[in-house]
Amino acid sequence: MSGVKVIGAGLAGCEAAYQLSKRGIKVELYDAKPLKKSPAHHKDYLCEIVCSNSFKANRVNSAAGLLKEEMRRLDSLLMKVADSSSVPAGGALAVDRDEFSEKVTDYITHDENITVISQEIEKIPEDGITIIATGPLTFEKLSEDIKNRFGESLRFFDAAAPIVSFESIDMSCAFFESRYQKGDGDDYLNCPMNKEEYERFYQALISAERAPVHEFDVMNPKVYEGCMPIEVMAQRGVDTVRFGPMKPVGLRDPRTGHRPWAVLQLRKENREGSMYNLVGFQTNLKFSEQKRVFSLIPALKNADFLRYGVMHRNTFIDSPRLLNSDYSLRENKNIFFAGQITGVEGYMESASSGLIAGINAARLIQDQKTVTLPRETMIGALSRYISDETIRDFQPMGANFGVLPELIDRPRDKAQRGQAYADRALAALDEFKKSL
């Protein structure tokens, strides 16, 4: 049986390769690593996690949790690895990033149906069945080929948060607690601030010097709302950050017995708890400025920054004009796109698109009709959203209940409403699986 080319060995590409292999399809999995890396990548592993190590909420009555449960029921490789590489994160699923990437790499490289080829692909292959999963950091030559073939691709900026060492955090100014006591008590480390401390930090933040951004209009970059740099958010007003990533609700400072004025939450980056991520603090400040400004937070006054935040270019195609809901090109059904380049936003959203593209590439090569999951499922709803021709101002979309059809009897309670969406989606998925 002939094989399939998969271009890109990130989350979408590795998931697609696995889905093809388990159906007996030979796969050539191309990735530029280790010969070439993007500015955001540092390791030789496949499936490297470059932004937050959190895959968002895990409870099934949340949109992100429902997506994960659907993937588990479809035998997702990345969900199996994520579950086995998890670190405590309250109600979220977070992973030890190195362990996660190592396990995926080990599985993929030892799969007898998958051949990993270290090579930069500069043009869309014209022969055979291909899945393009090069992600939001697609290298320039392939990006130019895509643009020349399909017209100007859309672009936006993405940013990653700093990581500090646990031993350098001043614990006399910090406390462990999840908001509203959800999850285990040590899932999040909270760095509280009073009004005076916050306002001093805020003034430093909005006046701090940013790192130069290449290839784009530095004065007015197009920033995706879901990964907005903290300094850009702060420009919207003194209370924007305090009502955003630094909101103090659901927390009580044990030193005062009262709710803090503002709180920075830190989350474990690895199983050992030696590294902590500054939650919601994606940034493009210069490294020296990150050290100066973030050290104004009392608990971080002596912080050792193991990784500074970075900002990098992201690209995604105009999927509503180009793709079918099975992730194939409208003009050539032998070519599939998958991952964040399609406009699905988020780690597991990206992997889920690779899962469906892999299933459909296998069905195509076996002379079967390609499939789209039911619109009641999160995976099916997202694939329909990115292929909806009526959308004009297309923006990346992550899992959310807004993309699902409305419930007939919509509960007023948020948790009950989420559970109703989940029950309906999983029932539809289980019924749909009988036809696969």
Image: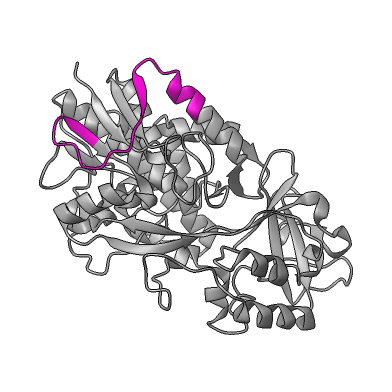
Determine if the magenta segment contains residue 356: no
**Horizontal and vertical percent position of residue 433:** 31, 31
Outermost residue, left direction? 331
Residue 326 sits in quarter: top left
- Is residue 350 shown above or below 74? below
Residue drawn 18% across and 36% down? Answer: 125
- Residue 186 appears at what percent x and percent y? 77, 49
Residue 85, relative to residue 415: is it above or below? above
Q: Is residue 436 visible?
A: no
Q: Residue at x 28, y 62 (%)?
A: 154
Residue 94: horizontal and vertical position, in percent? 60, 45
Foreground of the two, 233 or 360 = 233
| Visible residue check, residue 275 | yes
Magenta span contains residue 109: yes
Q: Which residue is drawn at 42% across and 40% down?
A: 36
Image coordinates of residue 355 in percent, x first then y, are: 35, 36
Colouring scheme applied when the structure was drawn: one colour
Camera-side residue of 37 and 98 = 37
Q: Give the range drawn in magenta.
A: 105-130
The quarter of the image holding the C terminus is: top left
Q: Quadrant of residue 71?
A: top left
135 shown above or below 299:
above
Q: Residue at x 26, y 37 (%)?
A: 131
Where does the N terminus fall, quadrant-wise? top left
